Image (cartoon, rainbow, N blue to C red):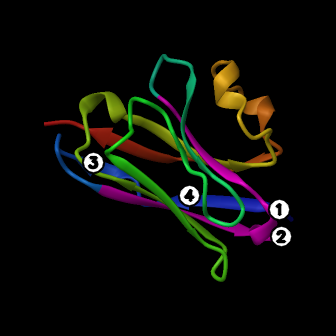
Amino acid sequence: EVKLVESGGGLVQPGGSLRLTCAGSGFTFSHNALVWVRQAPGKRLEWVSAINSAGGDPYYADSVKGRFTISRDNAKSMLYLQLNDLKIEDTGTYYCARDFRWGMWYFGAPQMSDFGTRGQGTQVTVSS
């Protein structure tokens, strides 16, 4: 069974940090580009960051550039997202996903149907 399982979310004050993780199983992790997307309450899904199969060519949404860092460890089948200098508007459910067309972020907001597999999500709440 192909699975992605996110963890690491939580409640943090503005300016704080979190590290999200996504564990992959049931597929050849090192062959897949991966992406983080998020959804705030009452809002549509949005792109956050993506990384190619080798761990390079990262994409960041303008809203997170300079604050978030994506990385991966193919030996451990793990994807990471380091969230620094968190803002209230970063609040939402964060999902990792695979099996998508690289560069889709240039064509508009994502939909869940754009991904072959996604995790169940991890909640990030930024509040004072």
Which element is circle 1 on? loop
Q: Would residue 114 be seen by someone viewing this image from the given angle?
A: yes
Task: Name which of mark 3 and mark 1 comes first in the sequence.
Answer: 1
Q: Quadrant of residue 30?
A: bottom right
**How far is the residue under mark 3 from the one under mark 4?**
16 Å
Q: Are marks 3 and 1 in contact (CB under 8 Å)?
A: no
Which element is circle 4 on? strand
Categorize mark 2 by other alpha carbons within 10 Å: few (<14), some (14-19), many (20+): few
Identify the residue under disc 3: 11
**How far is the residue under mark 1 from the one under mark 4?**
14 Å
Quarter occupied by the N terminus:
bottom right
Residue 20 magenta-drawn?
yes
Q: Which mark, by number, is residue 6?
A: 4
Categorize mark 3 by other alpha carbons within 10 Å: few (<14), some (14-19), many (20+): some
Question: Looking at the image, is mark 3 or mark 2 nearer the viewer?
Answer: 2
Q: Are marks 3 and 4 in contact (CB under 8 Å)?
A: no
Task: Name which of mark 3 and mark 4 comes first in the sequence.
Answer: 4
**How far is the residue under mark 3 from the one under mark 1?**
29 Å
Query: What amino acid does circle 4 point to?
Result: Glu
Which element is circle 2 on? loop
Quarter occupied by the C terminus:
top left
Categorize mark 1 by other alpha carbons within 10 Å: few (<14), some (14-19), many (20+): few
Choose between 111 and 75: the one closer to the eye: 75
Q: Residue furthest left?
A: 128
Which element is circle 3 on? strand
Q: Are marks 1 and 2 in contact (CB under 8 Å)?
A: yes
**How far is the residue under mark 3 from the one under mark 2?**
31 Å
- The picture places residue 71, in percent across and down from the top left corner, at 52, 63
Query: What amino acid does circle 1 point to?
Result: Val
- The picture places residue 77, in percent across and down from the top left corner, at 67, 74
